[in-house]
Image (cartoon, helix red, strand yellow):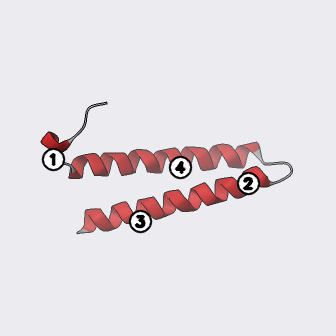
Amino acid sequence: MATYEHLVSLKDKHASLDAELGKEQLRPMPDSAVLMRLKKEKLRLKEQILRLEEEATPYRDRHVH
């Protein structure tokens, strides 16, 4: 299923960005522009992941928060 493979790919990229963000934050003088770019990209991926997961979940099984 292409959607599942795409979802796994997005989650892998999200995890990689998280690791990269952690490394940048550990530097003695983190680059704020790099941090901002990584955080924005990570958020963009998270939104895509949530959208795909929502599309894959039947309406009756969704939980309202």
Q: Earlier in the sequence, mark 4 or mark 1?
A: 4
Left or right? Give the position of 43 relative to 62.
right
SS state under label 4? helix
Ranked by sequence position, the earlier of labels 4 and 2 is: 2
Q: Secondary structure at mark 2?
A: helix
Q: Amino acid at mark 1?
A: Pro
Q: Nearer the viewer, mark 1 or mark 3?
A: 1
> Does 46 sit left or right of 26 as displayed?
left
Which residue does the image show at 17% across and 43% down from the upper left? Answer: 61
* Amino acid type at mark 4: Lys
Q: Position of residue 62 (x, y in %)?
A: 21, 40
Residue at horizontal 75%, vertical 43%?
Answer: 32
Q: Are marks 4 and 1 in contact (CB under 8 Å)?
A: no
The N terminus appears in which quarter of the rendering? Answer: bottom left
Write down the residue under mark 2: 24
- Label 3: few (<14), some (14–19) or many (≥20) C-alpha neighbours in 10 Å: few
The answer to whether the residue labelled 1 contacts the one labelled 3, judged by CB atoms less than 8 Å apart, is no
Q: Amino acid at mark 2?
A: Glu
Relative height, residue 15 to residue 61 (above, below):
below
Instruction: Give me the C-alpha separation between circle 4 and circle 2.
Output: 14 Å
User: On the image, numbered disc 4 is attached to which residue?
Assistant: 42
- Which residue in the structure is indicated by mark 1? 58
What is the residue that sits farthest to the right in this orientation?
Answer: 28
Q: Earlier in the sequence, mark 2 or mark 1?
A: 2
Cα distance in 3D space between marks 3 and 2: 23 Å
Residue marked by disc 3: 9
Q: Which mark sits nearer the N-terminus, 1 or 3?
A: 3
Label 2 and label 1: CA atoms lie apart by: 39 Å
Mark 1 lies on a secondary structure that is: loop
Circles 3 and 4, Cβ within 8 Å, touching? The answer is no
Image position, residue 42 (x, y; %): 53, 49
In the picture as drawn, the residue positioned furthest to the top comes out as 65
